[in-house]
Image (cartoon, helix red, strand yellow):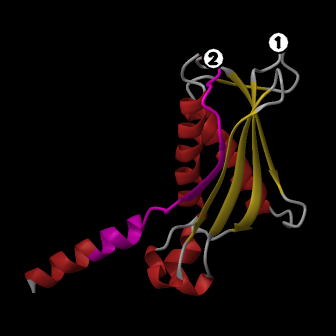
Amino acid sequence: MLLFRYFLTIAMVVMLCGCAAQINERTSIKSTEATASNVSVLLEVQPLERIDESKSLTTSIAELKKVISKKYLGSIASASENPKPEALLKITIEQFRHVSGFGRFMAGSMVGDAVLKLNVKLIAVADGRVIHESTLDTQSSFGEGVFGATTSRQIEAMSVKIIDILNSNTAKS
């Protein structure tokens, strides 16, 4: 009986924590030259036109911007700032399907797969040169059930990867 309680406790902890999102990265452009240290970056996040605007998409974009702004070592600039930012981080949402934590907990895999695919471009503003371009995608799968990643976990994992891209490409002169 005691062993069953331990098992039940461990199962509940795992169920509430869930799984982290696995990110696939395909880099198409990676410059060998980095820009100056801790540069000012203009952050632009837009969905493709074919993706329907929704409250969950708007909320996810705001969450992604917030997490990136908080974790980036340099500064995130606004478009109207003077002097102009040194780099533009252009994130295009290519695929998006929102799955909330509550939905995942209540219905498991029946709520479907959470999908997030981003095209990330880091562009030098001065000359328009593409410093880095990658496609990042993550998707939960049916087999993960209640343990599958939700959209908020995917955004957190994507932001870590984007911050790595930013910091590695703006780390040294």
Of the residues shown, which amino acid type is indicated by label 1? Pro
- In the picture, residue 96 is in which quadrant? bottom right
Position of residue 159 relative to residue 116, above or below, is above
Can residue 13 be found in the magenta stretch? yes
Along the horizontal axis of the image, is 154 left or right of 117? left
Where 103 falls versus 56 (above or below)? below
Q: Is residue 53 left or right of residue 155?
A: right
Q: Position of residue 91 (x, y in %)?
A: 74, 46
Name the side, left or right, on which 57 lies relative to 69: right
> What type is the residue that disc 2 sits on?
Ala
Q: Nearer the viewer, residue 111 or 122?
A: 122
Q: Which residue is mark 2?
A: 36
* Label 2 packing within 10 angstroms: few (<14), some (14-19), many (20+): some
Q: Residues within 10 Å of mark 1 (few under 14, many from 20)?
A: few
Mark 1 lies on residue: 83
Pick the front one: 107 or 71: 71
Image quadrant of residue 16?
Answer: bottom left
